[in-house]
Image (cartoon, rainbow, N blue to C red):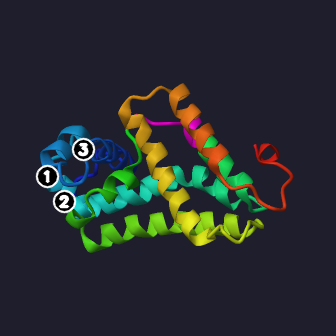
Amino acid sequence: MARPKNYQRDDVINQALEVFWRKGYAATSLSDLTEITGLNKRSLYNEFGSKEALFLEVLSHYRSLRAPVIERLTHPPLGLHNIRQLYLKMAEAIDCRGCLLALSLNELELLSPEAAGRVSQSMEGLRTLMQANLEAEVFAETVDSRALATLLSMQVTSIAGMGKLAMTREQIQAAVNQLLLMLPTPLNSATAAEQL
């Protein structure tokens, strides 16, 4: 007869998230995971199958945690205003750990194809949302909305990484405000200030 579990699966995923977020996938050992979760290796394997499978669960959980921030890009009407609000919200809620997805980009070659695919898919999803908001605006012909969407989605990972540099919230907000001033002004908007 199987013994009843004395732990909650969601708690284990949350605890594992902290380790992967702090150390990265490659540097996180099974010993790290057993230490933080209080489970032995056999229990971890019985529940998740492998370190890789647990990391996939962690990635899914992390994506659900960050969804409310990214969903800012889906608010109607689409436009540059959504991108501005996303950046401002990120500056207010900066985390000293950075962004797990951005950190995982640095070790894509060390991840399984499935994990690497999920990270890449998340980043492409962000770029696609950026592009949809840009295409809702009317810009000068010199503005390439696809290239700009790529650049702006890269800035999201840069802003998230500022927390790891021990920058103050005020410094990060000042940098974000400067970035906002550099965004192109839509031809269908009187002034950039109206978008703030």
Q: Which mark is residue 23?
A: 3
Say what secondary structure mark 2 lies in. helix
> In the figure, is residue 170 to the left or right of 52?
right
Q: Tag 1: residue type?
A: Lys
On screen, residue 136 above or below 161:
below
> In the figure, is residue 135 to the left or right of 164?
right
The spot of residue 175 in percent (x, y) is 54, 36
| Mark 2 → mark 3, Cα distance in angstroms | 20 Å
- Asked if the residue at tag 1 contacts the one at tag 2, i.e. Cβ–Cβ closer than 8 Å, the answer is yes
Q: Earlier in the sequence, mark 3 or mark 1?
A: 3
| Mark 3 → mark 1, Cα distance in angstroms | 19 Å
Decide which of 174, 104 is in the foreground and name it: 174
Q: Which mark is residue 45?
A: 2
Q: Residue at x 46, y 64 (%)?
A: 123
Q: Residue at x 54, y 63 (%)?
A: 126
The spot of residue 162 in percent (x, y) is 43, 38
The spot of residue 186 in percent (x, y) is 77, 59
> In the figure, is residue 67 to the left or right of 8?
right
Q: Range of the magenta residues?
A: 90-96
Q: Earlier in the sequence, mark 2 or mark 3?
A: 3
Decide which of 175, 90 is in the foreground and name it: 175
Q: Is residue 43 magenta?
A: no
Say what secondary structure mark 3 lies in. helix
| Mark 2 → mark 1, Cα distance in angstroms | 6 Å
Q: Tag 2: residue type?
A: Tyr
Residue labelled with disc 1: 41
The spot of residue 184 in percent (x, y) is 68, 56
> In the figure, is residue 150 to the left or right of 134?
left
Q: Tag 3: residue type?
A: Lys
